[in-house]
């Protein structure tokens, strides 16, 4: 064979190989590249969705924890300023304070007052009760009773008090304490 024929055959063979490569590329590689690109796009979109959902879940968890702390704060405020008069609760608290102080609760009465007016629309109005209490005991037990009443969970103000000896004998170790206490509640 002549060199020119070899050249033409090698050019034709190279052209056939090139056409074969193009057919293989167009028939096999190009569709797979399209599938790979689709899968890559799907992976990227799922990663973005996962990140955005994770961020949203984190924000929701933060809000839930904030609302739980607000609920705990509401419970604390409700202990200090209950949402109703709850005279029996006040009686139980005062009776417990008297028992802890080794004093004897001799009388208890409650008188409700009108609600205080408020100019703010979202603020609950405050109501108050005047509680008249008589307690008997030693000087130390009555002192402890007053101290415990001051530091009680429920907000209350002592408006007036009378400290008297029991039976009119000032030398006895038994005294009587008459209190007028104002306590508050929310509407």
Image (cartoon, grey):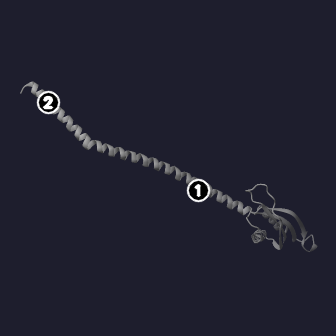
153 to the left or right of 171: left
* Residue count near mark 2 (Cα–Cα under 10 Å), binned few <14, some 14–19, many ≥20: few
Quadrant of the rendered image containing residue 110: bottom right
Q: Position of residue 42 (x, y in %)?
A: 39, 48
Task: Report which residue position mark 1 lands on.
Answer: 64
The answer to whether residue 182 is seen in the rendering is yes
Q: Position of residue 163 (x, y in %)?
A: 89, 67
Q: Position of residue 97 (x, y in %)?
A: 77, 68
Quadrant showing the N terminus? top left
In the rendered view, tell whether residue 35 sits above or below residue 165: above
Is the C-beta separation of discs 2 and 1 under 8 Å? no
Residue at (87% x, 70% y) in the render: 176
13 to the left or right of 40: left
Dot 1: what SS? Answer: helix
In the rendered view, tell whether residue 56 sits above or below residue 109: above
Residue placed most toward the observer, 141 or 38: 38
What is the spatial separation of the Cα atoms under label 2 and label 1, in whole angstroms? 76 Å
45 to the left or right of 14: right
Residue farthest to the left, as pictured = 1
The answer to whether residue 143 is seen in the rendering is no
Residue placed most toward the observer, 174 or 185: 185
The tag earlier along the polypeptide, 2 or 1, is: 2
Residue at (56% x, 54% y) in the render: 60
In the rendered view, tell whether residue 71 sits above or below residue 35: below
Task: Report which residue position mark 2 lands on.
Answer: 10
- Which label is found at residue 102? none
* Residue count near mark 1 (Cα–Cα under 10 Å), binned few <14, some 14–19, many ≥20: few
């Amino acid at each position: 064979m002549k060199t020119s024929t070899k050249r033409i055959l090698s050019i034709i063979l190279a052209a056939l190989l090139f056409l074969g490569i193009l057919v293989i590329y167009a028939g096999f590689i190009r569709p797979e590249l399209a599938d790979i690109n689709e899968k890559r796009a799907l992976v990227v979109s799922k990663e973005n969705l996962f990140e955005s959902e994770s961020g949203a879940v984190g924000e929701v968890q933060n809000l839930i924890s904030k609302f739980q702390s607000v609920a705990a704060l509401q419970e604390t405020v409700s202990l200090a300023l209950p949402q109703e008069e709850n005279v029996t609760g006040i009686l139980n608290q005062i009776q417990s304070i008297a028992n802890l102080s080794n004093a004897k609760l001799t009388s208890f009465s409650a008188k409700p007052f009108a609600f205080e007016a408020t100019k703010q629309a979202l603020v609950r109005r405050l109501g108050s009760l005047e509680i008249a209490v008589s307690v008997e005991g030693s000087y130390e037990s009555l002192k402890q009773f007053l101290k415990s009443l001051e530091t009680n969970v429920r907000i209350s103000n002592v408006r007036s008090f009378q400290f008297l000896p029991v039976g009119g004998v000032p030398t006895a170790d038994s005294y009587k304490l008459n209190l007028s206490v104002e306590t508050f509640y929310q509407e």
